[in-house]
Image (cartoon, coloured by chain):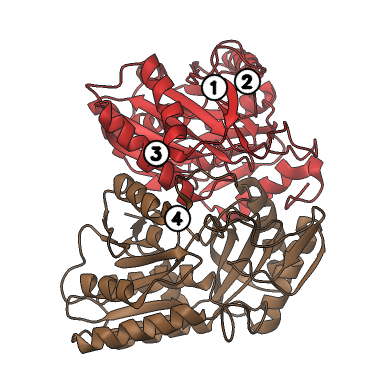
Chain colours: A red, B brown
Amino acid sequence: MKKLINNPDNVIADALKGIAASDKDVRVDFENRVIYRATPKDGGKVAIISGGGSGHEPMHGGFVGTGMLDAACAGEVFTSPTPDQMLAATTTVDNGAGVLHIVKNYTGDVMNFEMAAELAADAGIEVATVVVADDVAVQDSLYTAGRRGVGTTVLLEKIVGAAAEEGGDLASIQALAQKVADNGRSMGMALTSCTVPSAGKPTFDLPENEMEIGIGIHGEPGRHREPIGDAHSVAEQLVQPILADLDFTGAPVIAMLNGMGGTPLIELYVMYAEVIALLEDAGVKVERNLVGNYITSLEMAGCSLTLLRADDEMIRLWDAPVQSAGLRWGL
Amino acid sequence: MKKLINNPDNVIADALKGIAASDKDVRVDFENRVIYRATPKDGGKVAIISGGGSGHEPMHGGFVGTGMLDAACAGEVFTSPTPDQMLAATTTVDNGAGVLHIVKNYTGDVMNFEMAAELAADAGIEVATVVVADDVAVQDSLYTAGRRGVGTTVLLEKIVGAAAEEGGDLASIQALAQKVADNGRSMGMALTSCTVPSAGKPTFDLPENEMEIGIGIHGEPGRHREPIGDAHSVAEQLVQPILADLDFTGAPVIAMLNGMGGTPLIELYVMYAEVIALLEDAGVKVERNLVGNYITSLEMAGCSLTLLRADDEMIRLWDAPVQSAGLRWGL
């Protein structure tokens, strides 16, 4: 296993030390593995938290900061955080206006966030929840009933984070979050597997000449395997299922071409050129974009495409300042 | 070869299309492979350009933007751009106050930038040059006479870019650049090789249980190979040669823990925690830092550490706003 780690069982604890040491704008609750803002939001504003298994960095901890998340809790690699962690994040950031939980649709995450919401309610904290289930690849997978939650989560955290900064109430924030979740679609592919440190061997085997189309962010099987194609044909296999699932014409679109972790940026730009050409041919107008590593799967090589059918309000919120380790502009 | 590309011979051209499509703040001269700002600096200010072989993204093209570079030219993968490209970049951005060339110390780059400077002088453009040679690993390598130029280049482009934005003259900008170059040191290591697309096979072989300490950003051999150690021991092997080469106590230090491209962010944070603990023990005070992929070697797994012995003026310029695809804050 070729990894820059100490004890495979302590990777998250060790990484949290590095985050605390490098980012002066966040604090880390090491016991609960919660990353939260060093300077809390002004009182009376809705707080936004998310969380999930680790190994997808910068998501979610890297998105804690002004204009995005108030806190994130980190589970073990590819494993949901516990309800206690989620409750700790919730109580840390609540300032009376309620807390939105952003949950990716995996069975463990959904169950644990539900339990955390109940515990928070018992403690007098109002919680609303949005579940992201945007992966068009497969209906059910190893980890989830229904579609998996993937790249739309990043766009949602940015947009909803901006809205919360402006002071919307919990009901309106939740409605916006649901609208983003309903209008985002993603599709991913992999050239290689990745290795969970505590497992010590690749999650799956992918022969030297093959790629997997429709893969999940934990290496869950996708739609099929086939010989590695060129960037153009890979782009077609990402774009077509997304456009077949939702009409992206007639609205401003936010596109994210995301790297899975082990694919160099130069290849992501090659892919983006192919994707944008296909979208233009299909009459889809991309108004904003991200190209880079935002929701990763450790060192997996591959990429995913996320499209969000936005509206003027979402674009305005997208453009609002954000200052987090993983995403920042305009501050 | 597991890559998201079309024709291996067209990777740079294809990637430039993606950069042009994704970043509204830059323009691409496809013929000369020059990336330059969509909105030029105000007249009368020194322009800053850099360039080098591709495969190190986001460096250099990703650092074109307000507060950093005015233009960058992209060579083939791991191959110097031609003097013509450098001249095109120089003439594109000059507005009468002269142009600084930031050159990494590789034989081809140095020679071609010298030739471009002469051609620019013939055309009446004043050019000054700074050569970065900050790699403490080896004195000479396959590509260079003297030390290789690596991570300090990123910090230099940020600091000098900020100074140029403020309106310093060419002599003062060059002096600042030289001061940064003189006070930066780097050391890298790799867990895996990388594959140049046109070669189609890994640049070198590194057995499953070995790592290479002191590697260059083109896979040039380093100091030695040894069995993979834990993050703590790797950190020691990066920190010690740097501290042995220059005294970093008694000054504010800017640290960059850089990923080589294929190493996930979670491991970089583990490494940063180890590095910062060692530096604290050594009495080195890190005032600013970067953790992420800034000067990469395609999909190579590994990392490098760069320390800059800064001063208050460099810290002030470091904090100045920057808006580029690869590095941005404060705007």
Q: Which residue is mark 2?
A: A109
Q: Which residue is mark 1?
A: A103
The chain under label 4 reads B
The answer to whether residue A29 of the structure is visible from this angle is yes
The chain under label 2 reads A
From the viewer's perspective, is B69 left or right of B204?
left
Q: Are marks 2 and 4 in contact (CB under 8 Å)?
A: no
Rendered view: A327 above or below A281: below
The chain under label 1 reads A
Graded by Cα atoms within 10 Å as few (under 14), some (14 to 19) or many (20 or more), the crowding at tag 2 reads many
Secondary structure category for the residue under label 3 = loop
Q: Are marks 2 and 3 in contact (CB under 8 Å)?
A: no
Q: Which residue is mark 4?
A: B9
Q: Three-letter amino acid code at disc 1?
A: Val
Tell me which label, 2 or 3, sits earlier in the chain: 3
Q: Are marks 1 and 2 in contact (CB under 8 Å)?
A: yes
Tell me the mark number nearer the camera, choosing from 2 and 4: 4
Q: Three-letter amino acid code at disc 2?
A: Asp
The chain under label 3 reads A
Q: Three-letter amino acid code at disc 3?
A: Gly
Which quadrant, please, contains the C terminus of chain B? bottom left
Secondary structure category for the residue under label 1 = strand
